[in-house]
Image (cartoon, helix red, strand yellow):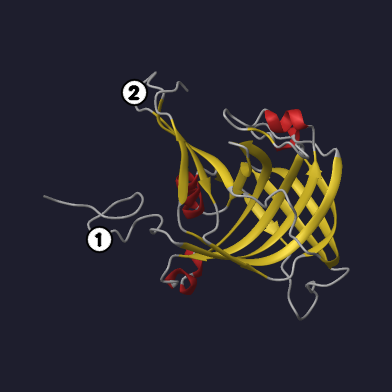
């Protein structure tokens, strides 16, 4: 019998064409985080059952830009950078399940297909976008990571700008913010191939870093703007009150999650 290999599509005789390798997946990245408060009702409408609003600060939102280099355990993608480097911008809120506080990614845009495939596996609602952020550098005109440094970031999708920010660092911080500081609670959904068949896959999963290391976080202030677009709803999470902005360089390993609930009989 013929067998095919690969962690993800396309599966072939050798497995070399698979869009993503098997975990663990390793990441090095620069994170630019902007936290603000919105109407808690706008957060609530993005939380499917059985998730509920966080009891404390339920309208808190974080919009995070990330400039990543990623690889599998071997690290070989780092030597072929087109397979390692990508950028993303994602929006997270907090929620509760079973008495525990979780972070949930409600929107996310990336600029590489392999990042979308990983997101499908992990339960992230990834879409293609155009992302850019200022990179620090110790020489020339680029900002250093220091007081007064200014970083810009933009997000666009389908030729429309969705968000832009300018972050000015103020001082070292004890944290990199609080909204993205919990395990993730995500859904993995796949409609049945049969019309009217509901969901073939309907899982609520917990996901988080298997290991984490990070440089000194910095806190500062942000000028953040959100824009309307025909096929995006980020602007519904309108800015009511700024909280803070942060910058940190991190290293993360992801190596699987945990099933919280499974229901394959529910309707779409």
Residue at image coords 57%, 42%: 185
Residue at image coords 80%, 71%: 143
Q: Is residue 158 above or below residue 246?
A: above
Q: Which residue is mark 1?
A: 14
Secondary structure of residue under mark 2: loop
| Disc assigned to residue 194 | 2
Q: Quadrant of residue 68?
A: bottom right
Residue at image coords 78%, 64%: 174
Residue at image coords 65%, 58%: 66
- Please provide percent x and percent y for residue 2: 14, 51
Q: Is residue 2 above or below residue 197?
A: below
- Please provide percent x and percent y for residue 149: 84, 68
- Please provide percent x and percent y for residue 79: 47, 74
Residue furthest toward the front? 99
Q: Nearer the viewer, residue 116 or 266?
A: 266
- Please provide percent x and percent y for residue 191: 42, 29
Q: Residues within 10 Å of mark 1 (few under 14, many from 20)?
A: few
In this orientation, does residue 54 appear?
A: yes
In this orientation, does residue 125 appear?
A: no
Residue furthest toward the left? 1
Q: Is residue 27 left or right of residue 249?
A: left
Secondary structure of residue under mark 1: loop
């Amino acid at each position: 019998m013929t067998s095919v290999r690969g962690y993800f599509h396309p599966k072939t005789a050798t497995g070399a064409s698979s869009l993503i390798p098997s975990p663990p997946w390793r990441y090095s990245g620069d994170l630019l985080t902007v936290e603000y408060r919105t109407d808690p009702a706008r957060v609530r409408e993005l939380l499917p059952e059985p998730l509920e609003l966080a009891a404390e600060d339920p309208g808190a939102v974080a919009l995070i830009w990330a400039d990543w280099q990623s690889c599998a355990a071997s690290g070989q993608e780092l030597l072929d950078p087109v397979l390692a480097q990508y950028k993303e911008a994602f929006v997270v809120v907090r929620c509760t399940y079973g008495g525990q506080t979780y972070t949930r990614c409600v929107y996310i845009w990336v600029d590489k297909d392999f990042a979308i495939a990983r997101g499908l596996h992990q339960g992230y609602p990834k879409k293609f976008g155009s992302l850019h952020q200022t990179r620090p550098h110790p020489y020339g005109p680029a900002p250093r990571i220091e007081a007064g440094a200014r970083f810009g970031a933009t997000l666009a999708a389908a030729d429309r700008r969705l968000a832009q920010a300018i972050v000015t660092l103020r001082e070292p911080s004890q944290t990199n913010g609080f909204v993205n500081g919990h395990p993730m609670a995500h859904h993995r959904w796949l409609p049945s191939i049969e019309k009217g068949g509901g969901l073939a896959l309907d899982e609520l999963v917990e996901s988080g870093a298997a290991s984490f290391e990070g440089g000194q976080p910095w806190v500062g202030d942000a000028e953040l703007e959100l824009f309307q677009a025909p096929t995006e709803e980020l602007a519904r999470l309108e800015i009511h009150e700024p909280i803070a902005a942060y910058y940190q360089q991190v290293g993360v390993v992801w190596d699987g999650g945990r099933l919280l609930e499974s229901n394959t009989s529910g309707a779409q």
